[in-house]
């Protein structure tokens, strides 16, 4: 009798292999310049074979973004959420294709009928909550302006991050992480100790 876990484990491993290949190809060539045929070839599959693991092109791209988020969190889980976001923004300068995928796909998913709309709703809610907690912790430590509303600052930090990612696609001459850090410096304005 065959193990019921064998085929499932192989499917999970193949899905992870496809995602690794897709992350590399999209990061290198960009979202618009990469076809699902190229992604499938990079994973050693036919297009139909690759989509079998995801259901649709949109679900594949959502999975790529989830994998990107997981890799970023594993790579940059070094400080509070604000420090992590700053590190991710800096890293994004080296993966313009993934930034293009994220910017385009998140805009498309703004439509409530889009298959990935809920993914982005949940993603933004989680990031907003983590950033608001980091704002509160910095306020308690006296390193961030205590009069700033944590939820508002968290929302603005996400908006700045996303906006800088879009602008980076238009040959922005400044370093996006430096611009983000500049706003953080402004937020450290008068603290309890000032």
Image (cartoon, rainbow, N blue to C red):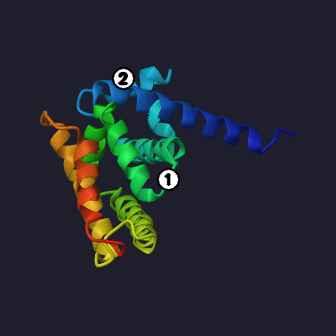
Left or right of 148? Residue 16 is right
Q: Which of marks 2 and 1 is in front?
A: 1
* Front residue (pair 3, 92): 92
Q: Residue at x 35, y 76 (%)?
A: 192
Helix, strand or loop status at disc 2: helix
Left or right of 56? Residue 31 is left
Distance between mark 2 and mark 1 Cα atoms? 37 Å
**Residue 4 against residue 95 in the figure, above or below:** below
Q: Which residue is drawn at 25% across and 39% down?
A: 100
Left or right of 66? Residue 105 is left
Q: Is residue 167 visible?
A: yes
**Residue 101, picture quadrant:** top left
Badge 2 density bin: few <14, some 14–19, many ≥20, Cα 10 Å? some
* Front residue (pair 35, 149): 149
Image location of residue 14, percent across then percent down: 58, 33
Q: Earlier in the sequence, mark 2 or mark 1?
A: 2
Q: Is residue 113 visible?
A: no
Q: Name the residue under label 2.
A: 38
Q: Name the residue under label 1.
A: 79
């Amino acid at each position: 009798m065959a193990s019921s876990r064998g085929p499932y484990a192989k499917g999970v491993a193949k899905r992870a292999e496809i995602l690794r290949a897709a992350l590399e190809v999209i990061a290198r060539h960009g979202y618009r310049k990469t076809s699902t045929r190229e992604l499938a070839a990079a994973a050693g599959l036919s297009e139909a074979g690759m989509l079998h693991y995801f259901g649709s092109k949109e679900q594949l791209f959502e999975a790529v973004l989830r994998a990107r988020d997981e890799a970023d969190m594993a790579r940059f889980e070094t400080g509070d959420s604000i420090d992590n976001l700053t590190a991710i923004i800096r890293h994004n300068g080296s993966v313009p294709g993934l930034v293009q995928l994220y910017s385009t796909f998140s805009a498309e998913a703004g439509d409530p009928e889009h298959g990935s709309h809920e993914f982005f709703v949940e993603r933004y809610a989680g990031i907003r909550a983590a950033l608001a907690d980091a704002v509160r912790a910095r306020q308690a430590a006296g390193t961030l302006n205590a009069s700033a509303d944590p939820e508002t600052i968290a929302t603005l930090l996400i908006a700045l991050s996303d906006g800088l990612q879009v602008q980076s696609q238009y040959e922005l001459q400044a370093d996006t992480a430096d611009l983000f850090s500049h706003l953080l410096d402004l937020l450290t304005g008068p603290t309890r100790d000032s």
